[in-house]
Amino acid sequence: MNALRKHRTLALAAVAFLPVLAIAESAAADQAPASQAQGNRTLMSSAPTSIPAPTLRKPATPQASPDAEGFIPRWLLLEPIPAPLLTQNAVQEEVHKDYFPDQFTVIPRDGDQVTVGNKELTWHAVDTKLYNVNLFHFAREHGMSAENVLFWAVAIVNCPKETPNVRLAIGSNSASVWWVNGEELIGIYGDRQTIVDDGVSKRITLKRGPNVIRAAVINGGGATDFCARFLDEGGKPLKGYTVTLSAGGR
Amino acid sequence: MEMKPLDERLMRLALVVIAFAMALPASALDGQVGIHDPSTIMVSNGKFYVYGTGGTPLVSDDGWTWRAGTRPPRAGLAPDVIHIGDRYYMYVASNPGGQPHAAINMIWSKSLDPGSPGYKWEEGGLVVSTNGIEDANGIDPGVFLDPTTGRLWLTYGSYFGYIRIVELDPKTGMRLMKKATDPKTGKITTSSPGFTNIAINCEASDMIYHDGWYYLLATHGSCCRGADSGYNIRMGRSRKPTGPFLDNMGLDMIQGGGKQLIGSGGRLIGAGHFGLLDLGDGIMKFSLHWEADLDRGGASVLDIRPLLWKDGWPVAGENLKEGTYEIESARSNNALELAVEGVPVGGRRSGRGRGATPGRGPGGRGIFGGTGGGPIPPQDVAEVSRNWPAGNITTRLSNYLCQAQQKWAIAPAPNAGGYPGSPYFKITVAGTDRALAATADAELVVLPAFTGAPEQLWRIEQVAEGTYRIMPKAVPGSKGPLVLSAVGSGFATLAKWDPAGDKQHWLLKTP
């Protein structure tokens, strides 16, 4: 029913009010976390205007810790790559293309650049102020569109000891594929909103020291974000580790 | 008041004996299940045992497939059995002079397994009797050990008057004896406390305890009339074993009250003789007999059903029937599916839905108009599965969209045995042989074909109204049983059974 109402609103807007609403909703989205902005996501503009990301900041400490609910706050994000489709087979094809050298093994540094097609794209280190990482804010900050694109994300999780029987648990808007230490663990597909623990991996063992989480998030239209945490054997958020920007703990 | 002369019961017994020789089709339980007035089902040496009128013994290795057992030395009417300490006490009734002149005797053995060294029935003696004049008929014993006090009780009675309760000695299984001193003579006498009348107009009573309440379950209606039997199990509850037992409307069972637990249903006529089968870990079932199973020539047969609880009352659950289902998580209401790319039913819509011109209503075109035609046929699994990988495929939980990879055929696995009340099932993607299985790392996988291996056999039991527990017969390398468990909203795994919460409760819906 809500979906129908949403589409009815959309239909009316499409006929008469789209320009006005688009501006209004875009402004509203600026003020709200992605989860609150999703109700009218299709009306938001992804106009490539550089606006500081209200939910992201540059890391200012050597290490970060998971938040109270275990969400990983620190990520390296690559500026978006065009990628139009969200279905399972299309996403799998997209994320396994060779976009840049060592894309499944590289641990990028803040400011590193890669060439994808004919564009130079930059890796940015970010800390999110929320449980989720708002990729719409990220793209807009760098003057880029967040629609029909693929974001690469990397996080380094440092465990004080080997930790068996944990699960990576993620949510994303929209499709995403996730790897831990090179093993593909999760794929969620289609036009979807970020729901905590929407995709959950099989049981894995986090090794002592650095563990690399790698994600590819593909967005269709409107808002885009993701969240990630580990769950312990009992399904509780895993904590007690640090998150750094390099495998050396930088 | 319904009268049941002894000769009617004996006639019924004769029919049951005849039914033993029949090859019975599988409907309620499997194998040889002819019985009338079954006792509580007991477990001894890993086997299930039940005894009926005439001593009818049935035994089963798994609770699903039954066969004839060994008749105890004392056979009579509607026995009941309880296990206390190292003894099995069996209470057996008789009508030596015709009803309501009756008696209940006790025999005991340390095992119910004739192959066990402890199998030897000993006579315990007379426990209660009725003289044919008083308003009670001393048959249909139901024995109950109060888990909160350790006190042992026996309910008994039939339509000739009241259902009564007396206290037994858990050390002996016989009537509890109390000493009293005569204040005048100083003489010490020993006597058993008297009975308490607790219900009327019923028989086959039994008692259970749950969450602060004592429930008296008794059978109303007429027995022994085949498909014309009105037997149905009703109940009241009390804070004390001695009553009063009030039904859900506040009517006392001693005035004929009783909330129905189960009556005739489908092709099964006349439900009687409740017996609790508590399998532990919150899994409760109950045994009963049907006066007439229309699929077995109208014979009286044993059955086992889930025992659920709602609003402080027992509820009779259903054993799962073969069919095609959506397996939906009660945690997220997402559906278990093969992790393959889904194809929208009716095909993909051309163009983008959002921002398109709205439809003109049903039958029209545009984003709300559908195909503009009639019903869209079900998805052809043969067609869409051509794009599925050939080997093992993982599973996940997703929005239910009526797609082929979300429909599961659940059917009894042939010759695979079962568990109390049901056979083991195979779970395959409907229209294919792709079988759901447990993996050695306690996850789920869908194999290209069903082979009958234990990790592909599923025990599916109703655990609450509308929800089921789903567990593989075996998980390779696992030390204990594991059950299907939602983890997050989009994934299913195998985990130790935890009845609390919704993550291990599954709705089986018709797709």
Image: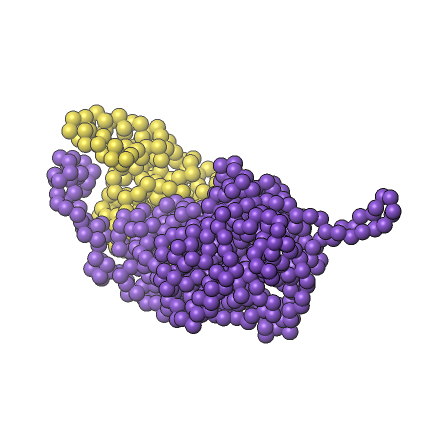
Chain colours: A yellow, B purple
- Residue B385 relative to residue B234: left or right: left
- Residue A228 relative to residue A173: left or right: right
Residue B154 location in percent, x, y?
62, 53
- Residue B74 relative to residue B424: left or right: right
Residue A175 location in percent, x, y?
30, 47
Residue B137 location in percent, x, y?
58, 53
Whether residue A67 is visible: yes
Viewer-proximal residue, A209 or A123?
Answer: A209
Q: Residue at x 34, y 50 (%)?
A: B509
Residue B504 location in percent, x, y?
45, 50
Viewer-proximal residue, B501 or B389?
Answer: B501
Q: Residue at x 65, y 55 (%)?
A: B128
Q: Quadrant of residue A1?
A: top left
Total number of numbered labels?
0
Q: Quadrant of residue A47?
A: top left
Work out whether B473 lies above or below B484. below
Work out whether B327 lies above or below B90. above
Q: Residue at x 39, y 55 (%)?
A: B228
Q: Residue at x 20, y 60 (%)?
A: B383
